[in-house]
Amino acid sequence: MRSFVVRSVEFALRRRGAASSNRRLFSSDSAPERKVAILGAAGGIGQPLALLMKLNPLVSDLALYDIAGTPGVAADVGHINTRAQVAGYAGEEQLGKALEGSDVVIIPAGVPRKPGMTRDDLFNINAGIVKSLCTAIAKYCPSAVVNMISNPVNSTVPIASEVFKRAGTYDEKKLFGVTTLDVVRAKTFYAGKAKVSVADVNVPVVGGHAGITILPLFSQATPASNDLSTEDIKALTKRTQDGGTEVVEAKAGKGSATLSMAYAGAIFADACLKGLNGVPDIVECSFVQSSITELPFFASKVRLGKNGVEEVLGLGPLSDYEKEGLENLKPELKASIEKGIRFAKDN
Ligand SMILES: NC(=O)C1=CN([C@@H]2O[C@H](COP(=O)(O)OP(=O)(O)OC[C@H]3O[C@@H](n4cnc5c(N)ncnc54)[C@H](O)[C@@H]3O)[C@@H](O)[C@H]2O)C=CC1
Ligand SMILES: O=C([O-])CC(=O)C(=O)O
């Protein structure tokens, strides 16, 4: 069972972009040492994400930090016989140790939505959490790649950028808002509707990570489908935009997406690690500092490399429906970005 699970995960990770000539990188004896820290590791996302990162052979050290509960998670996950050495850190006084030497820091710390709430309703609590965690990152691992999961991502990423700027450590190539779950959903919903194998599907999702700011580009989906009507595309777009709310409502007060998010977070962190290790042609969508529109942050396809972002890729050709969606999302996304920047400057 153990070798089946590990081999399946390794196989899935290899299929996702590593050329066979880079297979060497996956054997534990030759892969470089890479420390990954998860902040919020005892939470709904943090625990399954800790499990998935423990199964990733690119990770040599896994630091699990939360305000409480991480010694138990670390003891549990640490018994899995894979490469990563696991350590749990609880409470602010242990945050520095958790972060020191990290190559990648993943942040799913903060409160999740309940039915009836928007992601922006989380701002008041999560903005402060993200600000204090990023202040510690600037101090203890200023060159780490940061994967921001905490919502509202459209504001928490700008907050992080301001904190790093103030500390003098900002590197726009190393700050990522994790929007992979939007891509995961778009792929799943498209495959179901177009009746194609989900393993072969690709759909870029651009914009931001809330409601109409999530813009899936089904006109660029592969394999292309000629069977989908305009109404089908509109329905797929709406379902992708409302994917988070669908889970929040189904969980009925017990939180938001955790398992699919952990999967998406593990896929994105794996892509960052591969980029750092020099694996070529690693491309994922992410919310990053950008000049492809007039907005200072925007999600689009990004090529990952040894220094984080190697290239922010353009939007490609859009359908009229997507062009309209793009114009419609800009005011909301702009306001969320500005709200984050203002918070960081005022606090
Ligand atoms: N980017 C995305 O696509 C997604 C983002 N999210 C967001 O991820 C966040 C976490 O969601 P869940 O794991 O479901 O919530 P949760 O409440 O289950 O877990 C959050 C964890 O963060 C910890 N935490 C709170 N303050 C902290 C601090 N100062 N330092 C370290 N840890 C701290 C809590 O103790 C808790 O263990 C939420 O903001 C949610 O909206 C959720 C799903 C998808
Ligand atoms: O919807 C939420 O609150 C959590 C989230 O970001 C998602 O599931 O996409």
Image (tube, rainbow, N blue to C red):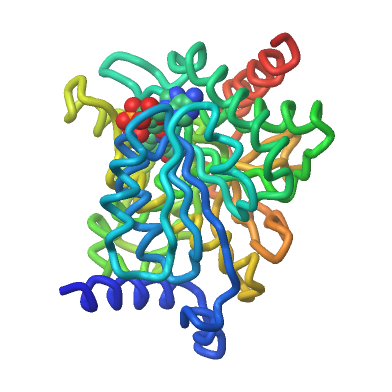
Q: Position of residue 305 (x, y in %)?
A: 68, 65
At horizontal 69% and vertical 18% (from top left) the residue drawn is 344
Residue 177 rendering spot, x and y as whole percentages? 56, 41
Q: Is residue 209 above or below residue 76?
A: above
Give the residue furthest to the right: 168
Residue 136 relative to residue 190: left or right: right
Q: Residue at x 17, y 22 (%)?
A: 252
Residue name at image x 44 percent, y 53 percent: 218
- Who is closer to the viewer here, 238 or 79? 79
* Quadrant of the rendering where the C terminus is positioned: top right
| Residue 295 visible in the shown view | no
- Left of 74 or right of it: where is 61? right
Q: Is residue 179 visible?
A: yes
As drawn, 122 above or below 80? above
Q: Is residue 76 above or below residue 194?
A: above
Would residue 86 appear left or right of 269 to someone viewing this image? left
Frontmost residue, 40 versus 11? 40
The single residue placed furthest to the bottom in the displayed view is 21
Of 253 and 87, nearer the camera is 87
Between 68 and 165, the one nearer to me in the picture? 68
In the image, residue 328 lies at what x, y percent?
56, 27
Which percent across, then down, holds residue 326?
58, 36
From the image, which quarter does the N terminus lie in? bottom left
Identify the image quadrant of residue 167. top right
Count of marks overlaid on the render: 0
Say which residue appears at 55% left-offset and 28% top-offset.
Answer: 93
